[in-house]
Image (cartoon, rainbow, N blue to C red):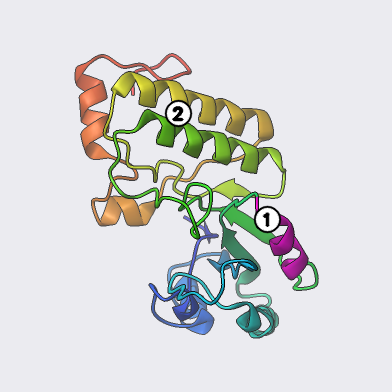
Amino acid sequence: MIANYHAHTYRCGHAEGNERDYAEKAVQAGLRTLGISDHTPYDFFDAGPRDRPMRMKPEELPEYADSVRALAEEYRGKLDILLGLEAEYYPKYFPRLLELLRDAGIQYIILGQHFLNNEVDGQYCGTPSPEAAALERYVSQSREAMETGLYTYFAHPDLFRFTGDEAVYDREMRKLCRTAGETGTPLEINLLGIRDGRHYPSRTRRARKKRSGWRSAWGWRS
């Protein structure tokens, strides 16, 4: 492994350390490229003040960007440091997000679709759900995001914790994968999910599909 583009700092509220801590660890591990991609601020202009522990505030963005850029210059020749963000695709608020980011010098954005619709009036995708309509909405919204051409890759695309009919899951995720292929959007295998035994990727689902002789969209057995 020579590159990591999915790294968060303390600003997102669920990680520890700052960008320098990550740069030092990256050098120690022999990485050549480190992308810092904290959770983006979002302007929920019509929702009023809200506690958002999973993302930085809009006013923190300039300091974040300046800090990562300064570190990139300091580590030049030793580690290639990129300034990124992880951002959901919320159609209602997305134009305001692009306006907010316009002058920040962001080098790449990864898609992390944590909520259906948006987090003001939507559903968190990591909560177990048997509802086919919810999965369909997740896939539809994710495909629309990839079709914007603004996302470098899709982080934990299997975050949606669907507990319903396997045939429905297979059908919808094939749609997602086809759109990823058509738009050239890589799909991440999330190492936090593997390390912590989370549902992305799901060992339970993988084992179930092996027992049932499931084959991937490309024809080989998963």
| Residues marked 1 and 2 touching at CB (< 8 Å) | no
Circle 1 Cα neighbour tier, 10 Å, few/some/many (<14 / 14–19 / ≥20): some
Task: Residue 178: name its quadrant.
Answer: top right
Which element carries disc 2, helix, strand or loop? helix
Residue found 52% across the figure and 77% down from its top:
23
Front residue of 162/82: it is 162
Span highlighted in magenta in the image: 92-101
> Could you say which disc has been placed on residue 173 in the image?
2
Task: Residue 53: name its quadrant.
Answer: bottom left
Q: What residue occupies the far right of the structure in this picture?
A: 103
Please name the amino acid that badge 2 sits on.
Answer: Met
x and y, in percent, of residue 98 in the image: 74, 61
Which element carries disc 1, helix, strand or loop? helix
Q: In the rendered view of the protein, which quadrant contains the C terminus?
A: top left
- Point out the tag, 1 or 2, that comes first from the N-terminus: 1
Q: Which residue is mark 1?
A: 94
Please name the amino acid that badge 1 sits on.
Answer: Phe
Circle 2 Cα neighbour tier, 10 Å, few/some/many (<14 / 14–19 / ≥20): some
